Image (cartoon, grey):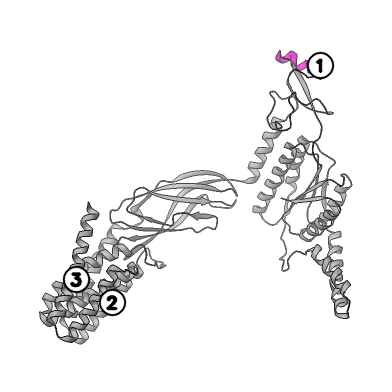
Amino acid sequence: MNIFRNRIIINALKFYVCAALIIIATLSDPVTAVVAVLVLLVFVFLQFWPVNAVISLIVSYFVFFAVAILFAPVSNFMISNLIALPVLFLVTNCLLNSAGFLPLIKSRYLHSFTQTGIILTFIAIVNLIVALFLGSLVLILAGSVAVIYLAVLSYVSFSRLSAKSLVVEKIQERIVAGTTAELQVNLHTKTKIGGVLSLESPYQWLKIHSPALLFNWDPMILKLSLTPLLSGPSEVVINALATDCWGLIQVRFQIAPVQLYIIPRVRYAAWLARRYLEATKPGMLPMISSISGVTPQFGFRRGIEYYNSQLYQPGDELKNMDWKHSAKYNKMITKEFVEFHGQPAVLLVNLSVGSAEEVDKLVQKTIVTALSLAREQIPTIIAAYDQSGVKLVTQTLQPHQIVVQSLEITKEITIFETPNRYLYRPDIGKLRADINRLASVGGDSSKALAQLLSVEYANIMNNVAFNPASKAINKAMKNTNQHSTFVVVSGLNHDADAIEANRFLMTRRGYAVVAV
């Protein structure tokens, strides 16, 4: 009902402006009449074909001065300003419509004028100065009225709009570092002045899905998407800029909608590993579900490695009966034996990182990869190294041992300063192909370029041969076969060239190389 009533009032004001300009054109001299007709045509055109809210605001603001000035020849300056006064209500409506579309300015002050407020005030003051210089009473009074009008609106905004006008329902979120969470926060307004709330994220890992909210809604729903780092803040702070409903005054403040409890990846990965080790402890009852995907209908009947004990099922062999546990639990219990399944793997781990954040990521990748290999019953060799040399190369491990060993090697991670790299990692395959193509072309220039590339290739391979990553790979290859898969967990710092070169060489020899 209020919207319908406001629309009627606004339409009545538009007809009022048109009628005033028509009267001016009828009663004034030809020059004034032509100006009034031009103003009328522009005003009517914008009503039927509006360009945007900002243009409509500027035109309505100038129409106020135009009506006051054009009516002066046919009446005194007091009456002409009284006739122009209702146009300010139309200006107010344009301010309400354009508040959400006008650009905001960055200011170091808590309260400041918006670009709209500055422009409108500047126009009114300049008009007042020009009027005083010309001695025009009509312009003096019109400029004074415009200044008073803007001053009243600004005072109302200053008194009712502040950082305390917004109440945030703070939420608490527990999240593993590096994972993404979608959150919704309720914001409540304590002012009835209305306006627009603009929000800006100060973090790269925080995305605001609703950067502009209207004060007319309560509650306002703030949608966030965050992927915090290990070193991220415990309290998420967002920059806020509130603008009044007329778009004249803006208030700068900060809100803290989320209290974060960041769980390091290393802690979460270690918790997963402990859960796995506790669940797969030999002799545990009841059976775990981690190997359900590879458990046959009547359990494991083949293999040489004792894995677990389970309730007797029809078809289990009597020689595998676990008489000790059967007597203890008063149930028929048999032993499970397991053999390695799947293609063997080599877990290659670079223990050198450049920061604490990289330590967290490396530990998570190492433990989670080891857990994945263990759950799939893949026989695995673990080879670990750092910038100084090879730290560990194991024999083929069974699932339980893979997880235990991964927890142990992560304790040897070291942080060192990585030198700056200015060139891309070498593409060994492309380099060798270029050498072969140039050698087959012939010609002095081609031979010279081929020799230059051969020197580069020899230098790269010489450095690769002495890299700890190559030494760890060579030792691991002695304990495995040609069908093994190399799983590489590395930050690609000191070993970047070695990993790329060995990836090319091992792929040609039949090995599969997977980077985590």
User: Can residue 463 be seen?
Assistant: yes
Main SS category, magenta section: helix
Query: Which residue does the image show at 43% across and 46% down from the upper left?
Result: 170
Query: Which residue does the image show at 63% across and 42% down from the upper left?
Result: 268
Q: Give the range drawn in magenta.
A: 321-330
Q: Earlier in the sequence, mark 3 or mark 2?
A: 3
Look at the numbered discs 1 and 2 and tell me whether their residues touch, using CB distance below 8 Å. Answer: no
Query: What amino acid is at disc 2?
Result: Ile
Q: In this view, does 136 lie above or below 251?
A: below
What separation in Å lies between label 1 and label 2 (alpha carbons)? 100 Å
Q: Is residue 272 above or below residue 163?
A: above
Q: Position of residue 179 (x, y in %)?
A: 59, 48
138 left or right, relative to 156: left
186 is within the stretch colored magenta: no
Residue 123: image tag:
2
Query: What amino acid is at disc 1?
Result: Leu
Q: In which quarter of the image is residue 19?
A: bottom left
Q: Which of marks 1 and 2 is nearer the N terminus?
A: 2
Residue 272: image tag:
none
Residue 318: image tag:
1
Which residue is under mark 3? Answer: 17
